[in-house]
Image: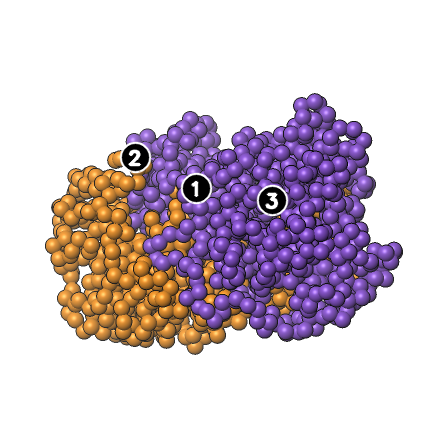
Chain colours: A orange, B purple
Amino acid sequence: MSNDANDSSDAESLVEEHEQRINDLVADVDDPAELGADEDDGFSMQLAGLELDRRDFMKAGAATGLASAAGAFAGCQTALPDGKTPSDSGGGGDGGSQGASASHGHFVPPGEKDEYYGFWSGGHSGEIRVIGIPSMRELQRIPVFNTEPARGYGFDDQSSEMLEQAGDYTWGDNHHPNLSETDGDYDGEYLYVNDKANGRIARVNLKYFETDAIVDVPNVQCIHGTTVLSPDTKYVLGNGEFRAPLPNDGRDVNNPEEYTALFSAVDPESMETAWQVKVDGNLDIVDTGKEGRWAISSCYNSEEATEIQGMTRDDRDYAKVFDIPAIEQAVENGNYEEVNGVPVVDGTRESDLNSGDEPLVRYISTPKSPHCVEVGPDGKYAFIAGKLSPTVTMLDLDKIGEVDDPADAVAGRPKVGLGPLHTTFDGNGHAYTSLFIDSQVAKWDIEEAANAELGSSDPVIEKQDVHYNPGHIQALEAMTTDPDGEWLISLNKLSKDRFLPVGPIHPDNDQLIHIGDGEKEMEIVADHPAYPEPHDCVFAHRDKINPATTWDKADYEGEKPFVTAENSGVERTGENSVHVKASSKRSEYGMYDFTVQEGDEVRLTVTNVEGVRDIIHGVAIPEHDVNLAVAPQDTREVTFTADDPGVYWIYCTYFCSALHLEMRSRMIVEPSE
Amino acid sequence: MSNDANDSSDAESLVEEHEQRINDLVADVDDPAELGADEDDGFSMQLAGLELDRRDFMKAGAATGLASAAGAFAGCQTALPDGKTPSDSGGGGDGGSQGASASHGHFVPPGEKDEYYGFWSGGHSGEIRVIGIPSMRELQRIPVFNTEPARGYGFDDQSSEMLEQAGDYTWGDNHHPNLSETDGDYDGEYLYVNDKANGRIARVNLKYFETDAIVDVPNVQCIHGTTVLSPDTKYVLGNGEFRAPLPNDGRDVNNPEEYTALFSAVDPESMETAWQVKVDGNLDIVDTGKEGRWAISSCYNSEEATEIQGMTRDDRDYAKVFDIPAIEQAVENGNYEEVNGVPVVDGTRESDLNSGDEPLVRYISTPKSPHCVEVGPDGKYAFIAGKLSPTVTMLDLDKIGEVDDPADAVAGRPKVGLGPLHTTFDGNGHAYTSLFIDSQVAKWDIEEAANAELGSSDPVIEKQDVHYNPGHIQALEAMTTDPDGEWLISLNKLSKDRFLPVGPIHPDNDQLIHIGDGEKEMEIVADHPAYPEPHDCVFAHRDKINPATTWDKADYEGEKPFVTAENSGVERTGENSVHVKASSKRSEYGMYDFTVQEGDEVRLTVTNVEGVRDIIHGVAIPEHDVNLAVAPQDTREVTFTADDPGVYWIYCTYFCSALHLEMRSRMIVEPSE
């Protein structure tokens, strides 16, 4: 392939690469039948461009990976990118020439506040981002799986210990933020998010906008899809994506047929893993019904291959529907194997078919490699986007438990466009599905799709170009029983030429789309660059979130002291250890200086005694790699070793008053000798 | 003091605290003369509210720290906060009711680009932020002193080694970003920034928007002010703020009179420390003239005290003017002491007075504790903001070398308001000074101030309320010889009630102010929340920055290989070490799997062979704390130990194609047995 870095030849080089790879792949295919159409709906793999126009067929760049799937695009060389840059392509509703007048209130004037909180996962940045809607301004970052000095996260003792106990990693890959629910609505208590990279789930306390717990879920290497069990957050559920030996301790490393994937349930209070379910294939995304019984996961690689050609070989994969009460009953009945302290029940097809009981997991055939699952606001359907099929499979959740053949619960399979990944809702009967390959959002009519015969429906009302290659899309409160409509965010993976260039690492592009109540056309109102790499977001009306503006010391009483000026001081706690306690207020710490001996382990406890909001005091210790952030009425602690004799000026890193520069304490480390 | 966390009683509790502290401080004052007025300009410490209205006197909260300065506010109890919340206070030009129509082009429509790059320091977050102007959208983050997984910074071998060699810290406190200059204009090559916490200076390569060098400057604990020497970036200059023993190795820890502060010059190419100058007092901020000779630093704590009361005791402090060629000559003449490999010349007052030669450093008396120094666009004046004095001291740089008494180079001292910290310029004869205590920006006439008698000028044209407590302010290209006007950013330290609440740690508030050509009134156009805690920013027109969109492999040839699919593979390099090389492209790595032995040290080299921009491939290694970001045509390396036998699915973290999920490589760690 071409390694030419010349950007202007994007389209050409991709065409070359595309053709070459298709030729290679065709040569590799053992069974020509694999190149044929999907037998079920006669459509999903017929991407030969006969029924679709150029835009619907393939876009430069985005489709190249798809083209590498075995044979999917064989024979399609006639439909090529036309070499236009995407910004040449026009596309309705860009708003490019409409300016602020078309902002629909996107612009929040100085002194006014946003109406919604948006919680963005930060992907491999490891953080959660809080973004105001509709202004799209980043209001806060919440470090979760990363370490972050401005908030002292991973620097103070408490967060350091939490990270250490959860695997001692300094990063994670967070994908799916979920708000805790009571009676099916957001209760503003917690946000839960997964770490795909290390199989963890974290909890963010929304009183303080801080991570307060992380569990390293046993037996799983990767948790991808994550959701809370509606309506009352009974569990946080995690899809184990990568198949691995169980346990992954060196056994069976060369026997992939012994690998397995697990579906995990974590208790939202104790953050301990309640149970796990062993399944076939790779688990991708998960959502639950509104009734508390069903959790629906998408599955790819039902082939259980270890290489991409094998993973995409067969034309069919599965959605898996977990019957939560049945799984709980199996655990209660003792029908499990305990692995690393966790009850693991067997939810593989073979086991379920042989058990004679109601299955723990229903396997429902779908076109191959589906991606996202979302359950609609009324809880009636689960929407499973096709990814490699241009369709969305609708499962009727009322029927799942009734039908003998789970396939009979498929209520619709509208074709929506190429590369459908995620679906969201306006609460007025419309679904919006992101089309990764088409770089579009398709709006379609849910009931029309449900009423049509499988494979024959065409419920698409409108398509909106986005820039470029959307992953998750989310409309306001779309995951509740009462979506608010008005705004939809398209989390576009590529931004290419949409912003000033900032080097080879490009930002993503989160586009704000006005959808109103769904009766008018979609309109792109604003582009917002995003640091790599948000995956998903969730919105809550501001009335549902009630953060504290200062700390309530009752929340840490007994764990940490409250240090005032009067009880500031140094106490020797051992031959080589001291405990230093200091208050802080504008513009002084409780002690102007303190002395320790070379080699001392120093435990430093700092309280901010102020009662007013937004007066934070920092605690930077030069050349000791420490920075704490102590908010009003809060106490933070850090332990370090005073290895090097000398004078070190501890200083305040949060600009707190006109005499902020003078806010210092002098640590004197006397040489041993 | 009150520890009451009730926010609504802010004003009352501050009044109480203020009164109590003034009483305490007055009781502590040894010499009543210290409470008197400044004898020089008869104004700087006369803050009794007689000449100023309420707003000009004191605002709730911000002034509390100031009130703690010994005696400065004694007797002023009559002028108290009125208990109004700041949003009650009205203030012209908030734009609150003007909406998008008053945006002056702030809103950049979808598909259009910003006109200016803004480079924000990230404070104790350790990063640089790239923000588009006028949209205020964050386009990119550049990790500098922090570690950051999304870009693999501090994760890949190269950046890890750079951080390790520069002190092995995982954070820094960056304050002052500076763009490299050629012929007095930005050349788009590099950005330099200081780490206040650990006395370091870093360089960001603007071809790749990546940090490429960090120097831990010897002999200094804290570098605060930082600038490049105009017009051709001969040095990066750093103000050592904290006084400490020289060297700080355990000697003299209890003899503060032996402590010293150093002014450092770093070579911008080699990033080695060229020389240092020992000075009296604490150095704060620095800027240089346009002629390449003078560097002007502000100084506080000329008392050389170790506690805040002593630091703010005397009514006068100094600006220091460094004569760069004279210092170079002293070094060349061998008039230095070498400490830790760096020539240190003596620039203390005593030394200079006794030398008989032209002084290396000119000490110019100013009202006490000045903060920022900025040199105006024509290079004529340096503007030294008073902080604890309501004045700005203007130094005539043409006179500095001519006058016998450096005080004669003071060309003006306009009073501008309370808590003046930083000054910026529109290029049309106006200066804009941030007023921390007044929470305002004052626009004033430079020549009018220069033409008035000292202490008598009143050149203020207009004041604009900001929200709240501004630190640095910057207008477009104000630090060049040809400022562009139009926009000014006020980096406000407190946001209080301006955004949706996000917990006790509040964002800062960067306000965008339209200034046009300076002939009309200032107007606040937008509030933008900022993660803690930007200190300063610098702007360059987009025509001056030319980042690459893919890597040029010539830039790392000889250091790192370019791995193609053909030369991907595993090579055993020792009994317990292997080198794994893999290419990457959509949607596959060069190897579907590879096997190592338990305990092996694994060096993994990954090249992205793609030629198209914005197709990044990630390299996440589960449970090994590794994530790399490999941009097109780039190679990254990471070395880790395969301690735990098992199967680990290396996966791509940058969504790159429809088959991104399937982009994996399987690392098999065989047990040793």
Out of B316 and B159, give the one closest to the viewer. Answer: B316
Image depth: mark 2 or mark 1 in front: 1
Identify the disc placed on residue B186.
none
Dot 3 falls on a residue whose secondary structure is strand
At a point 51% along the width and 60% down the height, the residue shown is B520
Dot 2 falls on a residue whose secondary structure is loop
Q: Position of residue B253 (x, y in %)?
A: 78, 40
Residue beneath label 1, please?
A: B544
Left or right? Give the position of B149 relative to A511: right
Left or right? Give the position of A153 relative to A515: right
Residue reaching furthest to the top: B333
At a point 53% along the width and 49% down the height, the residue shown is B427
Q: Position of residue B522 (x, y in %)?
A: 53, 61
**Does label 3 lie on the same chain as label 2?**
no
Left or right? Give the position of A208 relative to A388: right
Residue beneath label 3, please?
A: B375
Residue beneath label 2, please?
A: A3
Q: Position of residue A663 (x, y in %)?
A: 71, 53
Q: Is residue B432 visible?
A: yes
At a point 80% along the width and 66% down the height, the residue shown is B75
Q: Quadrant of the N terminus of chain B?
A: bottom right
Q: Residues within 10 Å of mark 1 (few under 14, many from 20)?
A: some
Amino acid carrying mark 3 in the image: Val
